[in-house]
Image (cartoon, rainbow, N blue to C red):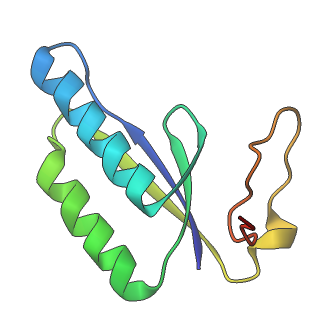
Amino acid sequence: MLLVVTYDVDTTNKEGEHRLRKVAQLCERYGMRVQNSVFEVLLDAAQLTTLKCELEKIIEPDVDSIRIYRLGNSYKNKIEVMGKTSVLQAGEPLLL
């Protein structure tokens, strides 16, 4: 299923900046950055559970926020892009 993961990490101190980098690096392992704090990720249920557990270990729930939007398996007709897009689109084959 395709998910959109967004985050807002409080960066008013060094610890927050460190958490922000960790969240971004974790999301990069699972999917593709489409905007500064927005990732599209293709995961199954087990991978989603793992991602959520890893994110919970990083963030401070009192000041940080993670949002996960589930677009499901028929996501291609649910995404409309205006303006600049990335070279790769989530779920598209990659030819090397």
| 83 on left or right of 32 | right
* Residue 54 location (% of width, % of height): 21, 62
Image coords of residue 26 (percent x, y): 32, 52
Task: Give the residue at the far top of this rendering.
Answer: 12
Q: Quadrant of residue 24?
A: top left
* Residue farthest toward the front in the current orientation of the protein: 96
Q: Image height check: is 13 above or below 56?
A: above
Q: Quadrant of the C terminus?
A: bottom right
* Of residues 6 and 91, the one drawn nearer to the viewer in this rendering: 91
Between 88 and 19, the residue placed more toward the observer is 88
Position of the N terminus, as image quadrant, is bottom right
Q: Position of residue 41 (x, y in %)?
A: 54, 64
Name which residue lies at 46% across and 60% down. Answer: 68
Tell me the quarter of the picture where residue 8 sits: top left
Please say if 35 is above or below 49. Answer: above
Left or right placement of residue 8 versus residue 70 in this view: left
Residue name at image x 41 percent, y 86 percent = 45
Q: How many marks?
A: 0
Which picture quadrant has residue 13? top left
Q: Residue at x 30, y 77 (%)?
A: 49
> For this view, does 84 lie left or right of residue 34?
right
Using residue 25 as the reference point, say whether residue 74 is left or right of it: right
Residue 75, horizontal then vertical, whole percent: 75, 73
